[in-house]
Image (cartoon, rainbow, N blue to C red):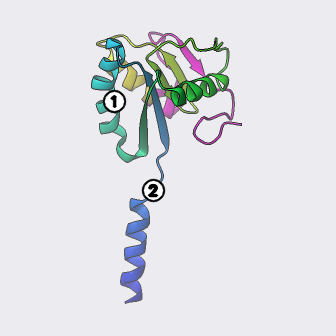
Amino acid sequence: MKKILCVLILLLSGCQSRPQYYLYVYFAKTCPVCQSFIKHVVPLLEEEYGNQMIIIEMDIDEEKSLDAYAKTCSLLEDYVFEGDAGSVPFIVLDGYFAKIGYDIGESQQMVDAVHDAIEGRELSSDITDIYKFKEGKTFHEGGN
């Protein structure tokens, strides 16, 4: 009986594993480029990373999103955040990089950029408007 209980506990603890990656997508409802990213890239990332990655979509027109946006920007190297101004889509792989903008039709390039960052490889030079996180900083874990 004890063996069965131990196996059950091990199986259940594996099902409750914490996600390893957090991707924030700051968007505007009226932005067609944002909608394209959400429609084409997000499903590819969900398929590839499953429950290892939490993808959080944040509408930049909501105050709580602006606060999160500002906090994220403060954790990035060489990024200047000017008040309410924010470009979308703003894609943030927490602890790895942030990217302003997305070119419609380049879904696989974005998936590759996320994968390369996670694997510790340099991002392709085709990927522009990239900002790296300050060393040891992360939004999800508090960042300070």
Relative to 133, does residue 53 appear above or below in the rendering? below
* Residue 131 painted magenta: yes
Q: Residue furthest right?
A: 144
Which residue, given by chain and number where applicable, does mark 2 sit on?
A: 17
The x, y position of residue 51, in whole percent, is 38, 47
Q: Relative to residue 25, is residue 35 drawn left or right?
A: left
> In this view of the protein, can residue 127 be seen by the observer?
yes
Asked whether residue 122 appears in the rendered view, the answer is no
| Magenta stretch prevailing secondary structure | loop
Question: In the shown orientation, is residue 54 left or right of residue 47?
Answer: right
User: Which numbered marker is on residue 42?
Assistant: 1
Q: Position of residue 112 (x, y in %)?
A: 39, 24
Counting residues from the start of the chain, the first of labels 1 and 2 encountered is: 2
Secondary structure, mark 2, is: loop
Mark 1, secondary structure of its residue: helix
Under mark 1, the amino acid is Val
Q: Nearer the viewer, residue 110 or 72?
A: 72
Q: Is residue 48 above or below residue 129?
A: below
Instruction: Identify the image quadrant of residue 34.
Output: top left
How many other residues sit within 10 Å of disc 1, few (<14), some (14-19) or many (≥20)? many
What segment is highlighted magenta in the picture? 115-144
Q: Residues at badges 1 and 2 in contact (C-beta under 8 Å)?
A: no
Rendered residue at 65%/40% (across/down): 142
- Rendering coords of residue 30 (x, y %): 34, 14
